[in-house]
Amino acid sequence: MSIYKFEPGEDLRGADLEGEDLEGVNLEGANLEGANLMEVDLSGANLREANLTEANLGYDGSLWYYALRVEPCFYKANLERADLTRANLVWSADFREANLTEANLTEANLPEANLTEANLTEANLTEANLTRANLTRADLTEAHLMEADLEEAWLTGANLTGANLTEAHLTGAHLIGANLTGANLTKADLRIADLIGTNLTEANLTGAHLIGTNLTGAVWDESTVWPEGFTPPEQ
C-alpha cells in the first residue's frame, strides 16, 4: 500500500509522480491535469471525479521503457466520473474490473488496454484510441463511442446495450456473444469483424460497412435496421 496521504480534491496539476506506488490511495476529486503518472500503480485507488486531463500515463518512448513494459495499473480502481480527456495511456494499461461509470475518456489514447470486466456504463469514449484493447465482458451500456478506434479490439461477451457507435472503427473486432441491443452502429466500419452470436435486436446499422463480417448465429428481428441492399443472415 502507498505511504502517501492525499486530501480529497488535492491540487496535483503537473505533479511528477513517476514510478510511485499509489495503490489504494484516496484521490477523489483530485486535480491531476497534466501530471506525470508514468508506471504508477493505482490499483484499488479512489479517483472518483478526479481530473486526469492530458495526464501522462504511458512511457517516454525509449527502448528501456519498452523492454520493461511496466503497464500503468488501475486494477479495480474507482474512476467514476473521472476526466481522462486526451490522457495518454500508451502500452497495455490495466483497467481490469475498474469502475469508469460516466468517465470522460474523449480522445484518450488506450491502445492494447486491458479493460476486462470494467464498468464503462455511460462513459464517453468519443474518438478514443482502443485499438486491440481487451474489453471482454466489459459493461458499455449506453456508452458514447462515436468515431472511436476499436480496430481488432476484443469485445467478447461485452454489454453494449444502447451504446452509440456511430462511425466507430471496428475493423477486425471480436464481438462474439456481445449484446448490441438498441446500439447505434450508423456508418460503423465492421469489415471482417466477428459477430458470431451477437445480439443485434433493435440495433441500427444504417450505412454500416459489413464486407466480410461474420454474422453466424447473430440474433436480430424486424426492429433491426440493416444497411440498404444488405441481405440479413438467416435466423
Image (tube, rainbow, N blue to C red):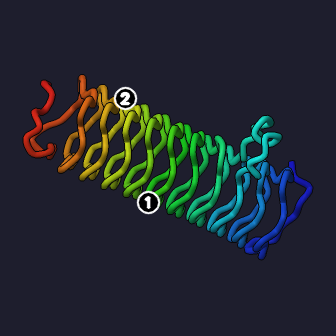
Distance between the alpha carbons at the discs numbered 1 and 2: 23 Å
Q: Which one is earlier in the sequence, the residue at label 1 or at label 2?
A: 1
Residue placed under numbered mark 2 in the picture: 176
Residue placed under numbered mark 1 in the picture: 126
Number of marks in the image?
Answer: 2
Q: Nearer the viewer, residue 197 or 173?
A: 173
Task: Name the spot of residue 199 as percent of width and height, x first.
Answer: 27, 35
Q: Nearer the viewer, residue 182 or 214?
A: 214
Of the residues tagged 1 and 2, which is closer to the observer? 1
Q: Residues within 10 Å of mark 2 (few under 14, many from 20)?
A: many
Specify the quadrant of the image occupied by residue 142. Answer: bottom left
Q: Is residue 198 left or right of residue 96?
A: left
Task: Name the spot of residue 197 as percent of width and height, x first.
Answer: 29, 27
Q: Nearer the viewer, residue 114 or 70?
A: 70
Residue at x 77% of width, y 57% of height: 37
Residue at x 75% of width, y 66% of height: 35
